[in-house]
Amino acid sequence: MKKLRIIVPLLFLILGYACTDELNYDAKKQADNSDSSAELSNCDINRGVKIAILSDVHYMDPSLLVKDGPAFQAYLAKDPKLLEYSSEILRAAVRDIIRKRPDLVLISGDLTKDGERISHERVASILRQFTMHGIKVVVTVGNHDVNNPEAERYIDDKTVPVPYVQADRIPFIYANCGFRNAIARDPNSLSYVNEPLRGLWIITIDANRYYDNTTKSTTPGVIKPETMTWVLEQLAKAQDRGKTVIGMMHHGLMEHYQGQQQVDPGYVVTNSANDVDALIEAGLKIILTGHYHATDITKKTLDDGKFVFDVETGSTVTYPCTYRMLTIKGDEFSFKSQSTTASMYPGFDDIAKTFSVNHYTDYFTYLLTNMGVPAAYAPTFAPWFKDAAMAHFAGDETPDMTVLPVQMGTLTSIGATDLANALGSFWTDINTTDNNVKINMTTGVAVAQ
C-alpha cells in the first residue's frame, strides 16, 4: 500500500466552541482600587466562599432560528454546538446554581452565539436572576461576543444579518455583572478588576481580537502589551493590599494537551510562554479560562517554585454540558464539576450525547477528508477522533490502552504520524486532575477528590 503523508494543518479543529440596568455607566470614571469604591458583600474570603463558574454558554436567542433548515445545519456542520437548546440550558443552569446558593458567579466569555445584540440583552436579563437572589456576577467576553459580522438569523436555507454589539456597549449591557462596580479598568481593552467579595479580586483579562474582525470573528487571542502592563500593575496592588486574586480570561493561558498550539492554534494566547511567566512572577496563582469547551486543569511551575493553575471550564452547549463549583477556604480551592443536563427534562442527556456523537463523527469525517485523508479511510478514523475529543471535553481522560496504541499504529503505518500524535495528545492529561480536585494555593499541591 502506498503510504500517505498527512501534515496536521494550522487549523485542525476549528470548533469555536461564546445584567442589564440603567445605562448610567461612566466609562471615564475609575476608582483608585480602594475598597470603598466597590459594594462589597459581607462574605469574607478567609471564612470560606462558594463560587459557580460557567463558560461558553453561547446563548442563541430563539428568535434567531426562525426555521431550521440547510443554513443552520451548515453552521452546525462546521461548529457543532447545542445552540438550539442554549436558552433552555442556560436557564436550567441558572436555576440549578441558585438552588446551590453560591456567593458569586463567574463567566469566562463567549456569552453569545455570535455577538447578536438580542442575545446579549437576553443573557443580561437571565443573569439578573442571580443578583435578585443576592448572588453577585462577574463576566468577561469571548471571541464570539464583540464586533462579530457572523451575527445572523436563520430562515430555512437563508441567513439574514442581525445587529451585533461593539466593545463600547459591553460595559453598559453588563453593568451589573462586574463593570459598574469595577475598581479599575484597562483603557486599552475590556479588562477590569472587581472585588465582589471582601478580600477577593477578580482580574478579568480581555485577550480577544475583535478589532481584527472583517467577515468572520477572529478565533486567536493576544494580551496586548499595554494590557499586560496594566494587569501586572493590578497584581502588584493586590499583593500590597493582601488580596486573594483570581484571574479570568476567555483564551487559555497555556496548553491543555501536549502540542495544542501546533495541533489547534488559536485557543492559547499568542506569546503564551512569556505571558505566563510574567504573570506567575507577578503573583498570579490561578486563572479561569474557557474557549476550548473542555473541562481541564493544567499547571506550570517555574524554577523558583512559583506556579499558576489554568482552570478551563467546559461549555454548557458541548457535551457533557458542565460547569464548576469552587469552594474556597483559606488557601484551599476545591473544584467540583456539575451537570447542566441533569437540570433539564428527563432524556435530555441522551439527546445531547447523541447530537455530539453524530455531529462530531460527521465533522471529523469532513475535516479528515479536507486534510487529504482518502475517502476510504476518513469514515474509519473519524470515530477515533470523535471519541478522543469528547473525552477531552469531559476531562480526566482514560484511554483504553488496548485500543489507542492500535489506532495510533494504524495512522503511523500509512504515514499519518502527525495525526497519530494528535490523537494521542487528546487522550493524555498533562499534570492535574480535571474535574474534582482540591488545590492548595500555598504549596501548589493538587489532590483528586
Image: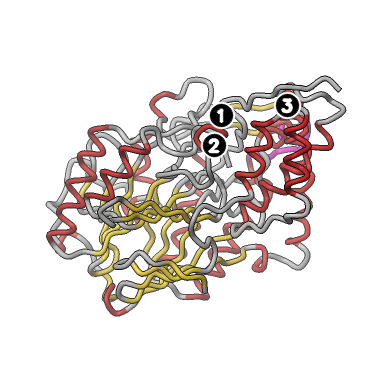
Is label 3 or label 2 in front?
3
Cα gap from disc 2 to disc 1, whole angstroms: 6 Å
Instruction: Kindly indicate the quadrant of the structure image that contains residue 208.
Output: top left
Q: Are marks 3 and 1 in contact (CB under 8 Å)?
A: no
Of pointers 3 and 1, the one earlier in the residue sequence: 1
Instruction: Kindly indicate the quadrant of the structure image that contains residue 408.
Output: top right
Residue visible at 31% across and 40% down? 275
Q: Is residue 363 visible?
A: yes
Q: Which one is nearer the viewer's eye here, 235 or 262?
A: 262
Residue tagged 1: 150
Q: Amino acid at mark 1?
A: Glu
How many other residues sit within 10 Å of disc 3, few (<14), some (14-19) or many (≥20)?
some
Cα gap from disc 3 to disc 2, whole angstroms: 38 Å
Q: Residue pushed farthest bottom?
A: 47
Q: Which one is nearer the viewer's eye here, 71 or 140?
A: 140
Mark number, residue 415? 3
Is label 3 or label 1 in front?
3
Q: Residue 448 in the image: state x and y as whole percent.
A: 51, 70
Q: Look at the image and tell me in which quarter the N terminus lies.
A: top right
Q: Which residues are magenta?
A: 64-73
Of pointers 3 and 2, the one earlier in the residue sequence: 2
Residue tagged 2: 114
Residue visible at 31% across and 72% down? 331
Q: Are marks 2 and 1 in contact (CB under 8 Å)?
A: yes
Q: Residue 121 in the image: state x and y as whole percent.
A: 47, 47
* Residue 377 sits above or below residue 179 on the image: above
- Label 1: which secondary element: loop
Q: Which one is nearer the viewer's eye here, 24 or 123?
A: 123
Q: Amino acid at mark 2?
A: Asp
